[in-house]
Image (cartoon, coloured by chain):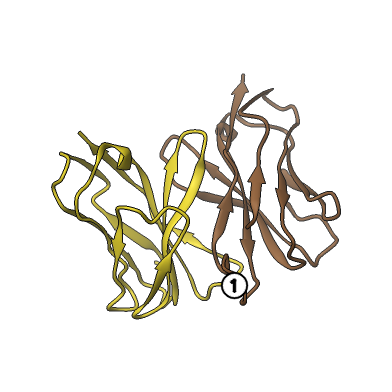
Chain colours: A yellow, B brown
Amino acid sequence: EAQVTQNPRYLITVTGKKLTVTCSQNMNHEYMSWYRQDPGLGLRQIYYSMNVEVTDKGDVPEGYKVSRKEKRNFPLILESPSPNQTSLYFCASSLYADSYEQYFGPGTRLTVT
Amino acid sequence: AQTVTQSQPEMSVQEAETVTLSCTYDTSESDYYLFWYKQPPSRQMILVIRQEAYKQQNATENRFSVNFQKAAKSFSLKISDSQLGDAAMYFCAYRSTNAGGTSYGKLTFGQGTILTVHP
């Protein structure tokens, strides 16, 4: 089954404790991205990757890091989480950047206290 | 940069009735994609319908249809014969296909509209 998986689905952590949210797709997609969803703001892009070893900032990259060492994986790293990073996070992938269809992961609810 | 605006934070409809959700966007590009996504309480993002900007014909998917007005930069979603399962947050989104632009590949979302369906 073609899918995007994210782990964990829920996470409660404390300020400053490094964490990683994993994202994996099994469709051999080149383009992957991370979004955060906040009330009244919709979803906003954090980082994206055009292909392996090619990543770039989206609209709200501050406080986040990413890596793309393998085509299927695109982890989101919060090196020192802060309460303003409490949000719902989505990973998404598509075959190419201009593909008609984009697949979303199930979302990760992160709470930073 | 592109922007997407959904001016209706909440909408409600009676079961079996029709409701229209509004979306406007701003762009200087001529070719792009537009989408409506549904987000039920499970939080999963579900694609409802999509439209390619170069196509003049409005997209339809069963009970869902759009009114795409390219010159007015408007992309509304009509849900006919509303069902209880249609209750969700709905997002309008824009995707740039301009390979030379800074927004290439990015989905730009509106703020969302919460749809309530009354039995």
Relative to residue B62, is residue B98 depicted above or below?
A: below
Circle 1 residues within 10 Å: few <14, some 14–19, many ≥20: some
Q: Position of residue B39 (x, y in %)?
A: 50, 41
Q: Depth check: give the residue in front, B34 or A40.
A: A40
Q: Position of residue B57 (x, y in %)?
A: 84, 59
Q: Residue at x 74, y 61 (%)?
A: B28
Q: Position of residue A56 (x, y in %)?
A: 42, 69
Q: Quadrant of residue A86?
A: top left
Amino acid type, residue under disc 1 in the picture: Asp
Q: Which residue is mark 1?
A: A98
Relative to residue A40, is residue A11 depicted above or below?
A: below
Q: Residue at x 73, y 65 (%)?
A: B29
Q: Is residue B62 visible?
A: no
The C terminus of chain B: image quadrant: top right
Q: Position of residue A29 (x, y in %)?
A: 44, 75
Q: Depth check: give the residue in front, B107 or B89.
A: B107
Q: Is residue B110 visible?
A: yes
Q: Depth check: give the residue in front, B116 or B30.
A: B30
- State left or right for residue B88 relative to residue A47: right
Q: Quadrant of residue A20?
A: bottom left
- State left or right for residue A52 relative to residue B60: left
The N terminus of chain B: image quadrant: bottom right
How many numbered markers are drawn?
A: 1
